[in-house]
Image: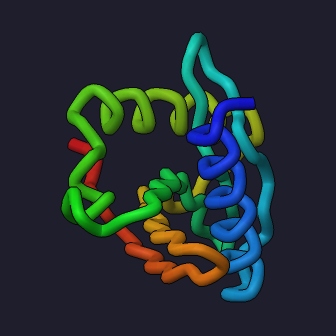
Amino acid sequence: MAAHNDLGNLGENIAAKRLADEGYEILERQWRYKHKEIDIIARKGNTLAIVEVKTRSSEQFGNTSDFITDDKMNFLVSASEVYAKAIGHGGEIRFDVVTIFVIGDEYKVEHIENAFISQ
């Protein structure tokens, strides 16, 4: 597996643990819709959190939450609607980003709730 895939998998594992520690139930990881995926789908109370995980080995290139394009946001919105309908979810859907900077054996995690609002 390529190093960037290893880093991405590490980041998703760290993010899932962080969310679970914050009281979220992890419903799905790498949930596929069409040809793309949602990194993590989690629930806390009546809120479904659609979580994009961004992992980098350096902060040199800016904030990882800035790497979410309009196309990615549109995909997350449409995929989340399909998922919510499939499980009969009638509550709030929120779009979060978990950013992770991994430097050696150390890492810094930031959970950004409501990273963007669907239009």
Query: If the image is split into quadrants, where does the C terminus sit?
Result: top left
Q: Give left or right: position of 116 versus 12.
A: left
Above or below for 36 versus 102? above
Residue 22, percent from left and from top: 67, 87
Residue extending farthest top = 34
Residue extending farthest bottom = 22
Q: Nearer the viewer, residue 36 or 5?
A: 5
Residue 12, percent from left and from top: 66, 57
How many dots with numbers? 0
The image's colouring method is rainbow
> Looking at the image, which residue is at 61% across and 48% down?
8
Above or below for 116 versus 87? below
Q: Nearer the viewer, residue 24 or 91?
A: 24
Q: Give left or right: position of 107 versus 31.
A: left
Which image quadrant is residue 104 in?
bottom right
Q: Nearer the viewer, residue 88 or 105?
A: 105
Residue 47, percent from left and from top: 58, 67
Above or below for 41 versus 94? above
Residue 87, percent from left and from top: 76, 40
> Looking at the image, which residue is at 77% across and 47% down?
28
Q: Nearer the viewer, residue 82 or 57?
A: 57
> Looking at the image, which residue is at 58% across and 12% down?
35
> Looking at the image, which residue is at 51% across and 79% down?
109
Query: If the image is split into quadrants, where does the N terminus sit?
Result: top right
